[in-house]
Image (spheres, helix red, strand yellow):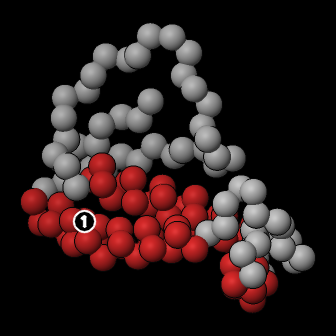
Amino acid sequence: MVDTPPDIGPQVRAIVRKLLTILGPLLESGAALIPGADAPRGRCQQTWCPACAVAAVAAGEQHPLVMIIAEHGATLLAVLQSASHPAEAPSAPAAGPVAPPQSRYQPIPVTIQD
């Protein structure tokens, strides 16, 4: 469960909303280029090889760097979206077990202090 961040103020919220209007369509159009799970793996599987990542996307193949960028892009978009809304009162914790995260990355709680 992620704690609700404190109110960040109207100026910062306006900047975050502007970032969302710029990054949102960019990330969504980039996501359309990412090959699906059924796509073949590219020949090069070196995680930090940008040339091979571009070649794999052009060939419709999967590449680790592209998948990492997609995961981080989606996370960035989610963080910006949550920051663009005013802070709400914390809700009661949900009963039952918490589902494991969908990616291999662990969420990092961020607290913004004035």
- Is residue 109 positioned above or below 100 on the image? below
Relative to 51, 97 lies left or right: left
Instruction: Estimate the x, y position of residue 11 in percent, counting from the top left.
Output: 12, 66
Residue identified by numbered label 1 = 16
**Residue for point 69% across, 79% down:** 57
Relative to 19, 102 lies left or right: right
Q: Residues within 10 Å of mark 1 (few under 14, many from 20)?
A: some
**Residue for point 50% across, 64% down:** 73
Q: Mark yes or no: residue 14 visible.
A: yes
Q: Mark yes or no: residue 50 visible.
A: no
Front in this rendered view, residue 61 or 65: 61
Q: Secondary structure at mark 1?
A: helix
What is the three-letter code of the residue carrying label 1?
A: Val
Instruction: Estimate the x, y position of residue 2 in percent, counting from the top left.
Output: 41, 35
- Is residue 96 positioned above or below 16 on the image? above
Relative to 74, 4 lies left or right: left
- Is residue 74 positioned above or below 65 on the image? above
**Residue for point 83% across, 73% down:** 42
